[in-house]
Image (tube, rainbow, N blue to C red):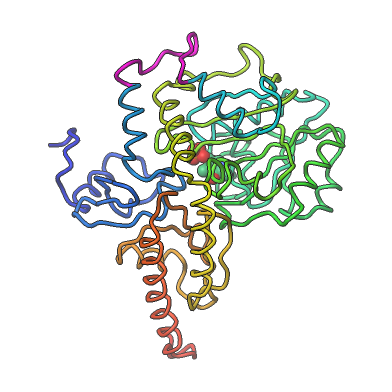
Amino acid sequence: MSGTQSTTGSNEAWGQRYAAAVMNTFGAPQRVLVRGEGAHVTDADGTEYTDLLAGIAVNILGHAHPAVVAAVTEQISTLGHVSNFFATPAQISLAEELDALVFPGTPAGSSKVFLANSGTEANEAAFKIARRHGGADRPRILALENAFHGRTMGALALTHKAAYREPFAPLPGGVEFLPAGDVGALRAAMGPDVAAVVLEPIQGEAGVKPLPAGYVEAAREATSAAGALLIIDEVQTGMGRTGAWMAHHLLAPGVIPDVVTLAKGLGGGMPIGAAVATGEAAALLGPGQHGTTFGGNPVACAAALAVISTVREEDLLQRTADLGERWAAALAAVPGVTEVRGAGLLRGVALADGLPPAARIAAELMERGFIVNAPRPDTLRLAPPLILSDADADAFTATLTDVLTEALQTRADAPTTQEGAA
Ligand SMILES: *Cc1c(COP(=O)(O)O)cnc(C)c1O
């Protein structure tokens, strides 16, 4: 049956076909998933899981949400794609919504959107906006240590991890990395030759690490004083994930960035990204200076519009803030957990020294029916759908308690000498 999309077959059989057919950029998949509903997914062996990762902060309404299904179905059966020689009501309506969501309180028409297809592409657009700002007089762009902004060459140049960057050198130049959260280092690096500062309000791939209080405000002050742009990457943190539409609304209220990038949660599972700019930054890319065939695709835009209206109708921002706070407090009390970072339903659960690596804990949690991931060796990441039930959150807390209690017990029982540790 090779070449068909039959869903029969085991995790193992599909895994072999994957290895034979798919380029090995991600390692072996942990499971092959065949179905999802709400916060639950089912694998090819018929095992069900509570999905606390949501496709890495993507499925904010969970799987197969009726509003997204209806919007996508209606749009694809009406008009599926037109190219950017034309426009569609879905694209225009989404751009209007995003201008207002990202930059509330700014005058209508002062903000503008570039629609792309992913987070890395949203950041490519932001990178080009930065290059257009000041041109040759502003060759420098400041990014932060441990930042993650994507895998295409421009976004990769802004990404800190050497293992991601070095195999692809030379990358676009002019990017410098500053210690995240160090206001003094930021002020010292700032000057009239800086085009932009780029930051994530909560560094997601770094282990869900919020920037310290006051840092984003300081970055706004320093960039404004030097005439540089402030670009905030909300690809992971945006669209309600933290309990506010944008994490910077919550963590740095009053700061108005020049450019905000979005993707992950925006389409509720459909691939879409956006760079949203305000003021002068909204006019830096002119006709012919950037483009994408699929960007603004009406099906993806219809999905994003359904996400926005559903978050509003179901009051999911408040729900996310409330559940996130209660759940984080419960998780922080689990033996073996040293800290719970983040906001809303984007959480990093830090594990005590001496416990097995977080990836091993995540694998054990999967055996017990929960999908999470390990962005760092000492941190589990939770980024569930915003529709997660109290019961599912509590069930995870109980299972994590079991898993960590057993691991702490094993550690306590383990021989402490080298000889015994064979
Ligand atoms: C995931 C992520 C990206 C890249 O998004 P892709 O859709 O994978 O290209 C960029 N920035 C941040 C903060 C992210 O979390």
Q: Which residues are magenta?
A: 76-90
Q: Residue at x 41, y 75 (%)?
A: 401
Residue 261 vs 187, above or below: the answer is above
Q: Residue at x 56, y 51 (%)?
A: 204
Instruction: Provide residue 296's location: percent of width, then percent of height.
Output: 48, 21
Instruction: Provide residue 336's location: percent of width, then percent of height.
Output: 50, 77
Q: In screen coordinates, is 199 left or right of 64? A: right
Q: How many marks?
A: 0
The residue lying toward the viewer, choosing from 130 and 19, is 130
Q: Residue at x 59, y 24 (%)?
A: 113
The residue lying toward the viewer, choosing from 325 and 303, is 325
Q: Is residue 88 magenta?
A: yes
The residue lying toward the viewer, choosing from 308 and 169, is 308
Instruction: Provide residue 90's location: percent of width, then percent of height.
Output: 45, 20
Q: Quadrant of the N terminus?
A: top left
Q: Quadrant of the C terminus?
A: bottom left
Q: Residue furthest top?
A: 85
Can residue 167 be seen from the camera position used here?
Answer: no
Q: Is residue 92 magenta?
A: no
Residue 340, quarter of the rendered image: bottom right
Residue 39 vs 169, above or below: the answer is below
Q: Residue at x 46, y 66 (%)?
A: 358
Residue 106, quarter of the rendered image: top right
- Magenta-highlighted stretch: main secondary structure? loop
Can residue 236 be seen from the camera position used here?
Answer: yes
Instruction: Provide residue 375's location: percent of width, then percent of height.
Output: 50, 57
